[in-house]
Structures are given as structure tokens and as C-alpha cells.
Image: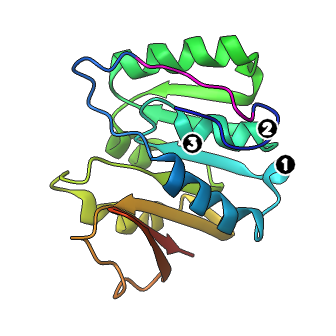
Amino acid sequence: MRIVSGQFKGRRFHPPADKWPTRPTTDFAKEGLFNILANQLDFAGLKVLDLFAGTGNLSYEFISRGCTDLTYVERFRGCVKFAEQTAKTLDIEPLIKIVRSDVFKFIKRTPEQFDFIFADPPYDLPSIDTIPDLVFEHQLLKENGWFVLEHGPKNDYQEHPHFVHKRKYGHTVFSFFE
């Protein structure tokens, strides 16, 4: 895992891989996503939510690029411990709120709204198709906010009322919603 740009550019982290339920976003896909975002968003002013955050790969990338208000949500204890250790190593603890929780429970109970939401669920998650509806149903996005769902090529959200466009990077697809 590597941070590709910003203050921590080039920093590498090696999460324990044995029996982890994660599939970190590839550097190729992450660079493509952040090239799109960098042309549209001011990272320093964003309130970001990272759902199914896993190793924290995307969270660290946002903070490296200037984000100062990020909420990381993951239920797997090993990932949460790794994210806490990494936040301490990078000295970014005041910038990241690490929440150990089931994402679906978090969505239903949080009173907060965010400028940008990223979700990277397991591609084979049976309830993956409900995530865009839940984000909008529970009004997690601020006005003019963006939601990006990472998924495999089998899922298609083009008929969703908030769908804007998608980008494909190998077997990784990012669907953008507003």
C-alpha cells in the first residue's frame, strides 16, 4: 500500500495480510480516482466519510492531500487497529475519526452529513446494491456532495436517480453519484 500524492507521497505501509477480509484499491485505480477528484474538489475543505475503509488506504490519501476532517468506518478489528497505528505513525490522529462499526448501522444512526463519501465494500457483498439508496435515504451527503462507490464490473448503477457517471480501471469500477 502506497500513498500516491500529497504530504505523505511515497510512504508505504504493509498491513498484515493473513486472513484479512480486505482488498485494497490498487494504486492504478486510486491514481485514476484522485486525478478526477483533484480537478473537481478542494481537499482541504472537505468533510469525508470512508465506508468499508479496510486498511485506510483511501483515508490516508485524502489526508495526505489536505483533508482535515475524515471519518473512517470499518467493522473488522484488525483493520481498525492497523488504522489507529498508521494514524499515530503519520501523526494525523486529530484529522481522522476512526469508528469501529458495521457500515449499515453507522449509516442509519449518524446525524452527520459529508461533502464526499467513498464506499469500498466487498465486491460480492449481497447487499452492495442497497448502499447508494441508503446514503441518499439517510441524507448523508451535503448539498452538492459526491458519493463514489467502488465495485466490480458485474454491478451497474446507471439507472439510479443520483448516478452521474462511472470510470473503470481494470476490474475496478467507480460509480459517481450526486
Disc ID at residue 58: 3
Drawn side of residue 154 relative to residue 104, left or right: left
Could you tell me if residue 41 is visible in this image? yes
Closer to us: mark 2 or mark 3? 3
Q: CA distance from mark 2 to mark 3?
A: 14 Å
* Label 2 packing within 10 angstroms: few (<14), some (14-19), many (20+): some
Kindly indicate whether the residue at mark 3 contacts the one at mark 1 (C-beta within 8 angstroms). no
Q: Which region of the structure is painted magenta?
A: 9-15
Residue 117 part of the magenta segment? no
Residue 13 part of the magenta segment? yes
Q: Amino acid at mark 1?
A: Ala
* Label 3 packing within 10 angstroms: few (<14), some (14-19), many (20+): many
Kindly indicate whether the residue at mark 1 contacts the one at mark 2 (C-beta within 8 angstroms). yes
| SS state under label 2 | loop
Task: Determine which quarter of the picture holds residue 128.
Answer: bottom left
Task: Determine which quarter of the picture holds residue 150.
Answer: bottom left
Going 75% across and 37% down the picture, which residue do you hit?
64
Q: Amino acid at mark 2?
A: Thr
Seen in the picture, residue 123 relative to 144 is either above or below; the reply is above
Going 66% across and 68% down the picture, which residue do you hit?
36
Task: Determine which residue is flagged by label 2.
Answer: 68
Task: Determine which residue is flagged by label 1.
Answer: 44
User: Looking at the picture, how far across and down is residue 113, in whole percent?
Assistant: 62, 54
Give the dominant element type of the magenta stretch: helix, strand or loop: loop
User: Looking at the picture, how far across and down is residue 53, in whole percent?
Assistant: 46, 37
Closer to us: mark 1 or mark 3? 3
